[in-house]
Image: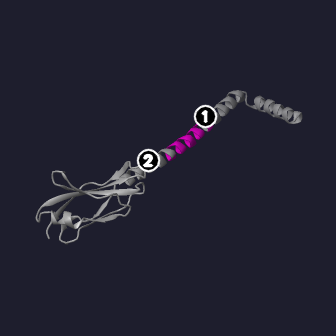
Amino acid sequence: MARVRERMRTIEREIMEEFPEWPQWKRRVRRGGMIALALGLGGIALAQLLGWLAQQEEMRRQRERARVIQLISPVSEVREEVIEFVWRPSPIADHYVVELSDVRYRLIWRSPPVKEVEVRLPEAVRRGLQRGERYLWQVRGFDARGNEVADSFFEEILILR
């Protein structure tokens, strides 16, 4: 090891004899190397941070999508005698409750909690709906402890039967 150091010193003396400004160049190269290293590490850290932030944003979007229940049927007009409400499941809901209201948001009927993604309106309630009238329905999702974790927008339906 001592031989290597001595050889390095000899080489450096020879360089300084040929190039008197060698110490300044050496400092500049060392400083430039340190700056390049710092910039490189900073770039890597920034790329990692941006990747982590993008991952967090995607997870936030997925949680938000899970909180919105998409209604499938009925939409718009109802012509059938049997009214069956159907929706897409939420990955965070354990069970659901369907609510039917008039256009002033006054509750007409609320289903019991159901695990399925469809429920039939009871015949007695259906008979009470007025032909040519508009009604609103919505689905609310609950976790196993009964906390509301998801819901749908209200869907307006027109009874035509």
Choose top left, top right, bottom left or bottom right for residue 91: bottom left
Label at residue 57: 2
Q: Are marks 2 and 1 in contact (CB under 8 Å)?
A: no
From this view, report whether residue 119 is shown above or below residue 33: below
Q: Position of residue 70 (x, y in %)?
A: 32, 59
Question: Magenta region's main secondary structure?
Answer: helix
Q: Amino acid at mark 1?
A: Ile
Residue 54, horizontal then vertical, whole percent: 47, 47
Q: Which mark is residue 124?
A: none
User: Residue 66 or 124: which is nearer the viewer?
Assistant: 124
- Indicate which disc, 2 or 1, sits on the residue closer to the N terminus: 1
In this view, the mark in front (2 or 1): 2
Q: Residue furthest front?
A: 124
Residue 98 lies in what quarter of the image? bottom left
Residue for badge 1 = 35
Where is residue 41? Give x, y as percent: 60, 39
Amino acid beneath label 2? Glu
Q: Residue at x 51, y 47 (%)?
A: 51
Q: Sort mark 2 into few (<14), some (14-19) or many (20+) by Cα contacts within 10 Å.
A: few
In which quadrant is the C terminus drawn? bottom left
What residue is rendered at 84% in x and 33% in y?
5
| SS at circle 1 | helix
Q: What separation in Å lies between label 2 and label 1 (alpha carbons)?
A: 32 Å
In the image, which residues are magenta?
37-51
